[in-house]
């Protein structure tokens, strides 16, 4: 159905609730905008039908579900929800941290989340090991949910721009506007974000200097009822083919590794990711007989010890973020080493 400027109501006597597109929400498709604003309370099929039948109006006219909205436009919808539930609360101007709204009165306090860095566009979270990036059936708590609670009432609830495995600690970025989400997505997809990790691995790594690791990895399909966290979900193909394709659906995985410290039965590795494949670092190190310490999937779990893989540094255009791991005991890192890494990485 083409756009038109028909301003007649969609049904006699029906009152349309106005939603104003904020600058943070600009650029979203109409269906995306409504899905987020209505917080999933209305099924997607119902939203599509309402848009396509003209019950939803943008500045008085009909629009298609994938029409991109601009800041300041008025979107009117039928009263799917009670008045006041569709419009997010504005941030409390009395807060010391602009853009972060106070929780509703009587609501439970958000679960703790350590913020490493924040500006108008993004927030960098210091993710602890053991906390999922996104919630699942087995793990209801997540960074994404804690961000939603922490920024409740913000014009655009922060959205994670990438992922870290549940047992990986380190820096995780989230966007505070749709434009920033697209910018970060483009940067990650094009290699515009430099990603450096630290990992303690089993055994003594044989090399001394930087080394390029290349493998073709294939993601396995899990059978119904299998749990990804208890089964290898990535394998290496037998023989990589030109262009990064092997005999199956594998993709080329590349990273640069450098040993930094050696103990009797462990080596600290610096890993610079050159591609971003599922479980890439864990698989590539395990393939060489040096799995990450306490990796229960590709190595062996050490009781009482979290997996020793940490996202140390993310370098974006104009900014570098650095977070030292919270490892302790025999795996604690010397401050002199951390200072050297911070300097070398420009953070």
Image (cartoon, grey):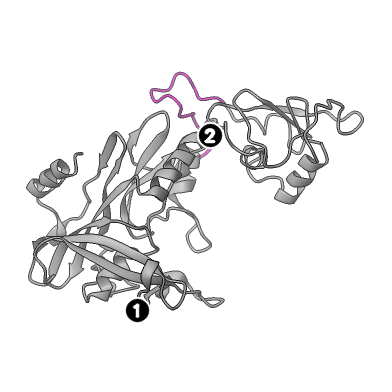
When the figure is inspected, residue 342 is found, relative to residue 200, above or below; the finding is above
In the figure, is residue 311 to the left or right of 346?
Answer: right
Residue behind mark 1: 239
Residue 177 among those drawn in magenta: no
Residue 99 among those drawn in magenta: yes
Q: Which residues are magenta?
A: 90-108
Mark drawn on residue 281: none
Asked if the residues shown at circle 1 and circle 2 are in contact, with their CB atoms under 8 angstroms apart, the answer is no
x, y percent for residue 75: 71, 29
x, y percent for residue 141: 47, 53
- Residue furthest to the top in view is 94
Callout 2 secondary element: loop
Instruction: Give 139 or 166, whichever is nearer the viewer.
Output: 166
Residue 177 visible in this rendered orientation of the protein: no
In the figure, is residue 347 to the left or right of 19?
Answer: left
- Quarter of the image containing the N terminus? top right
Q: Quadrant of residue 95?
A: top left
Callout 1 secondary element: loop
Residue behind mark 2: 156
Which numbered mark, 1 or 2, is in the foreground of this view? 1
When the figure is inspected, residue 253 is found, relative to residue 64, above or below; the finding is below
Mark 1, other Cα within 10 Å: few <14 / some 14–19 / many ≥20: few
x, y percent for residue 237: 37, 77
Going from N to C along the chain, the mark reached first, 1 or 2, is: 2
């Amino acid at each position: 159905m083409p756009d038109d400027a028909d301003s007649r109501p969609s049904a006699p006597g029906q009152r349309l609730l106005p939603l104003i597109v904020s600058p943070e929400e600009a650029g979203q498709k109409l269906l995306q905008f409504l899905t987020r604003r209505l917080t999933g309370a209305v099924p997607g099929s119902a939203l599509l039908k309402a848009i396509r039948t003209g019950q939803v109006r943008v500045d008085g006219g009909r629009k298609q579900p994938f029409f991109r909205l601009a800041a300041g436009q008025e979107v009117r919808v039928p009263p799917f929800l009670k008045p006041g539930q569709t419009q997010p609360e504005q941030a409390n101007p009395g807060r010391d941290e602009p853009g972060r709204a106070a929780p509703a009165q009587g609501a439970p306090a958000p679960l703790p989340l350590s913020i490493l860095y924040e500006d108008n566009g993004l927030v960098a979270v210091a993710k602890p090991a053991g906390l999922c990036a996104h919630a699942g059936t087995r793990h209801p708590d997540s960074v994404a949910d804690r961000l939603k609670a922490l920024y409740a009432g913000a014009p655009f609830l922060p959205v994670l721009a990438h992922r870290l495995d549940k047992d990986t600690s380190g820096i995780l970025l989230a966007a505070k506007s749709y434009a920033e989400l697209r910018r970060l997505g483009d940067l990650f997809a094009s290699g515009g974000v430099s990603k450096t990790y630290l990992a303690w691995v089993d055994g003594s790594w044989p090399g001394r200097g930087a080394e390029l690791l290349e493998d073709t990895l294939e993601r396995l399909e899990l059978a119904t009822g299998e749990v990804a966290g208890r089964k290898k979900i990535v394998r290496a193909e037998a023989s990589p083919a030109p262009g990064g394709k092997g005999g199956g659906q594998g993709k080329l995985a590349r990273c640069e590794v450098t040993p930094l410290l050696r103990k009797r039965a462990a080596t600290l590795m610096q890993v610079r990711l050159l591609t971003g494949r599922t479980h890439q670092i864990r698989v590539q190190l395990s393939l060489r007989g040096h799995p990450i310490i306490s990796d229960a999937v590709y190595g062996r779990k050490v009781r009482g010890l979290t997996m020793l893989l940490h996202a140390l540094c993310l370098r974006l255009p104009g900014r570098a973020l650095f977070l030292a791991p919270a490892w302790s005991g025999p795996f604690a890192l010397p401050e002199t080493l951390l200072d050297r890494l911070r300097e070398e990485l420009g953070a």
